[in-house]
């Protein structure tokens, strides 16, 4: 069932429908929380609490509106609050798989090794960015959120998302260029 | 000379980042669907248990209704001495509440939080009398402002501080609402109409101040930049604001509170997009806006 129907049923008290809704969004919710908190346990707690709060607030959810951005804003807020109470900066140590997703194939072992190294460098460079820029990039490119969804998740305007992403890409470009120059 | 690393290079980065997305190794996603379902089922069972208890006691409910009747209708008609005695029997709840409602000046408590409709200890009187009392006193009900919360809760939500009018005639709001659970949903402060504060439309509301994190566009404006559309510029503490009279119909569309056909003042301060809706003059509205602290 599509989100709108599940939301409608859940609003009428159908817990199974809400369970279906959670199942459909739990991965994105958890990963969003993880990108913000940088901690598995906190991400799980934040996402769980966000789903419970969203259920209680379903009565105020505007019928026909997309569920995902609304949910993500609750998840992100919950995650930010948890990180804030933990009083630390999220250290996001992301790793990329050496093998590509199923269906993709690198042309040769050598090319695969180069690509893998490049990805690791890119992730390393990403780790040096300001947190707000890194999160904007992660939401847009890793989670595949739209600009509007990213804005909702990060609690800022769309224009801010655009400028953060643009600034982040500029810095990544500079950093990667430096590494390329150093390697020559 | 370094090769051009302009737009092409940027899009290459974007492509690389997109390709990287599916390869990121996230921790495994926990089965939140099951955990959340379990929590909600438990809550529902607790609630049903409480409701069942009360539904099994119809006589007690009638007694509660009768007690509420005595407190609200019969007690005020008694002699002062008798009234004092009856009040001693029921020290809390209904009689005091209705007295406040008649006075109209007290903002009163916010409605119960979610789940607060389950009768509490000694709550039989309150649970019968409260909806009517609340309905009569609720200013912002039906204006699409969201859930009513306490001023204290609103203050706790606003990590960067809640701004309140500093003019002596306003002070603390009569009611506070929020459209959603997140801090980003902002708050709306509602003031009762009174001397010097004319009502908005057919309501008893005299002023609504909405505070949302972010910019006034897109928070309250859509369909065009305010400067280009000829909105009247005003200065609020040397910062640019916009004054929109009640009959404003041109783009950009200005978001107003449902059912409040007043004038609107928009401005920004300390990372907040602020909207003041009143039936006051521009000068009066700006004076209130500048008094926020």
Image: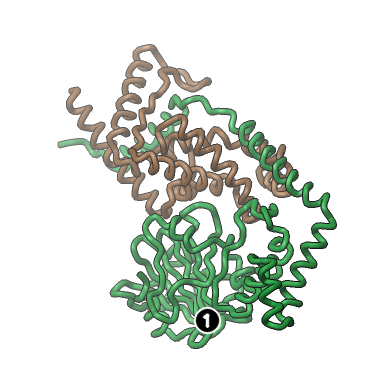
Chain colours: A brown, B green
Q: Position of residue B97 (x, y in %)?
A: 63, 71
What residue is rendered at 59% in x and 70% in y? Answer: B140
Q: Is residue B143 visible?
A: yes
Chain of the residue displaying label 1:
B
Q: Quadrant of the C terminus of chain A?
A: top left
| Of the pair A158 and A18, the residue shown nearer to us | A18
| Of the pair B106 and B84, the residue shown nearer to us | B84
Q: Position of residue B290 (x, y in %)?
A: 35, 76
| Of the pair B283 and B169, the residue shown nearer to us | B169
Q: Quadrant of the N terminus of chain A?
A: top right
What residue is rendered at 32% in x and 34% in y? Answer: A126
Q: Is residue B135 visible?
A: no
Q: Which residue is mark 1?
A: B246
Query: In this picture, is A136 found above or below A184?
Result: below
Q: Position of residue B65 (x, y in %)?
A: 78, 65
Q: Is residue B63 left or right of residue B153?
A: right
Q: Position of residue A7 (x, y in %)?
A: 67, 46
Element at label 1: loop
Crowding near pointer 1: few (<14 within 10 Å), some, many (20+)?
A: some
The image quadrant that residue B77 belongs to is: bottom right
The image quadrant that residue B75 belongs to is: bottom right
Query: In this picture, is A177 found above or below B227?
Result: above
Residue positioned most to the left: B1
Query: In this picture, is A56 found above or below B16?
Result: below
| Of the pair B78 and B147, the residue shown nearer to us | B78
Residue positioned most to the top: A109
Q: Is residue B153 left or right of residue B47?
A: left
What residue is rendered at 28% in x and 42% in y? Answer: A170
What residue is rendered at 67% in x and 71% in y? Answer: B87
């Amino acid at each position: 069932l599509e989100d709108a129907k599940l939301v409608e049923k859940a609003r009428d008290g159908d817990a199974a429908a809400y369970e279906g809704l959670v199942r459909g969004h739990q991965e994105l919710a958890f990963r969003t929380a993880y990108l913000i908190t940088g901690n598995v346990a906190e991400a799980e707690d934040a996402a769980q609490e966000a789903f419970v709060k969203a259920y209680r607030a379903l009565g105020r959810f505007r019928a026909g509106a997309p569920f995902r951005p609304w949910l993500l804003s609750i998840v992100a807020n919950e995650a930010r609050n948890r990180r804030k109470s933990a009083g630390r900066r999220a250290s996001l140590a992301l790793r990329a798989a050496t093998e590509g997703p199923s269906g993709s194939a690198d042309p040769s072992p050598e090319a695969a090794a180069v690509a893998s190294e490049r990805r690791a460098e890119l992730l390393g460079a990403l780790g040096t960015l300001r947190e707000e820029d890194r999160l904007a990039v992660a939401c847009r490119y890793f989670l595949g959120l739209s600009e509007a969804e990213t804005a909702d998740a990060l609690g800022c305007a769309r224009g801010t998302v655009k400028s953060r992403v643009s600034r982040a890409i500029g810095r990544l470009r500079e950093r990667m260029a430096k590494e390329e120059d150093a390697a020559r | 000379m370094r090769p051009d690393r302009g737009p092409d290079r940027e899009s290459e980065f974007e492509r690389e980042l997109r390709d990287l997305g599916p390869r990121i190794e996230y921790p495994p996603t926990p089965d939140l669907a099951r955990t959340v379902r379990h929590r909600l089922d438990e809550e529902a069972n607790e609630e049903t248990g409480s409701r069942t208890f009360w539904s099994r006691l119809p006589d007690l409910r009638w007694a509660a209704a009768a007690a509420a009747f005595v407190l609200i209708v019969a007690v005020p008609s008694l002699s002062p001495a008798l009234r004092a005695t009856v009040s001693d029997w029921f020290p809390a709840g209904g009689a005091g509440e209705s007295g406040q409602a008649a006075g109209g000046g007290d903002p009163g408590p916010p409605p119960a939080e979610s789940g607060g409709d389950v009768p509490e200890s000694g709550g039989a009187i309150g649970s019968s009398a409260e909806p009517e009392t609340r309905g009569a006193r609720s200013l912002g009900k039906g204006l699409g402002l969201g859930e009513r919360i306490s001023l204290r809760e609103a203050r706790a939500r606003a990590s960067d501080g809640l701004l309140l009018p500093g003019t002596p005639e306003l002070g603390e709001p009569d009611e506070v609402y929020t459209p959603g659970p997140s801090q980003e949903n902002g708050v709306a402060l509602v003031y009762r109409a009174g001397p010097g504060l004319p009502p908005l439309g057919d309501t008893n509301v005299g002023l609504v101040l909405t505070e949302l994190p972010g910019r006034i566009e897109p928070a309250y404006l859509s369909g065009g930049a305010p400067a280009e559309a000829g909105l009247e510029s005003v200065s609020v503490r040397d910062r640019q604001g916009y004054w929109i009279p009640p009959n404003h119909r041109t783009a950009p569309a200005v978001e107003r509170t449902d059912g409040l056909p007043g004038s609107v003042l928009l401005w920004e301060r300390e990372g907040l997009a602020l909207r003041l809706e009143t039936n006051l003059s521009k000068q009066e509205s700006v004076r209130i806006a500048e008094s926020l602290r």
